Image (cartoon, rainbow, N blue to C red):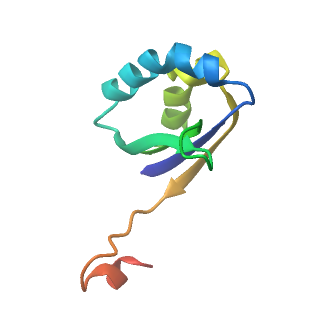
Amino acid sequence: MLYVIHCRDREGGAELRAAHTPAHAAYMCQHAPKVILGGPLMGEDGTTRVGILVVADFDGPEAVQAFLDREPYHQAGLFASVSVTRFVAVDHQGPEALKQVK
C-alpha cells in the first residue's frame, strides 16, 4: 500500500535539520526499496527547506509508524507536524490513464 508522509519542520529547525541530514539521508537509502519518491519541501524563496515529503510502500499504518519512529529527523524532534495518508498512484500518460481512475 502506498502512503504519503508529509512532515513540516518546526520554526527555527534549520540547525537541527543540518545536524541530522547525514543520518536522515543514510536512513532513506537503507529504505530505498520501500521509498518510491521523496525529497525536501521548500519555502517560497526556493532555498529554505521547510519539511519533507515521502511516498512509500508499506504493509499498513503500523509499518509506517515504525518507519517514522526510527527516522532521524523525527527522532530529533524536527517536525512540527506529520501527516500520513493512503495514496493511489495514477499514470496520467497515454490512452490507458483514465481507466486507472476509479
Q: Quadrant of residue 77?
A: top right
* Residue ID at (56%, 44%): 42
Tell me if 46 is positioned left or right of 11 in this view.
Answer: left
- What percent of the width, then of the height, locates residue 80? 73, 33
Residue 59 visible? The answer is no
Tell me if 29 is positioned left or right of 66 in this view.
Answer: left
* Residue ID at (58%, 22%): 17
Q: Quadrant of residue 88?
A: bottom left
- What percent of the width, then of the height, locates residue 97? 31, 80
Tell me if 30 is positioned left or right of 63 in this view.
Answer: left
Residue 12 visible? The answer is yes
User: How many numbered marks appear?
Assistant: 0
Nearer to us in this view, 47 or 82: 47
Q: Is residue 57 above or below residue 9?
A: below
* Residue ID at (49%, 49%): 3
* Residue ID at (32%, 27%): 29
Tell me if 81 is positioned left or right of 63 in this view.
Answer: right
Nearer to us in this view, 68 or 17: 17
Residue sitting farthest toward the top: 19
- What percent of the width, then of the height, locates residue 41? 55, 44
Q: Is residue 41 above or below residue 66?
A: below
- What percent of the width, then of the height, locates residue 10? 72, 30
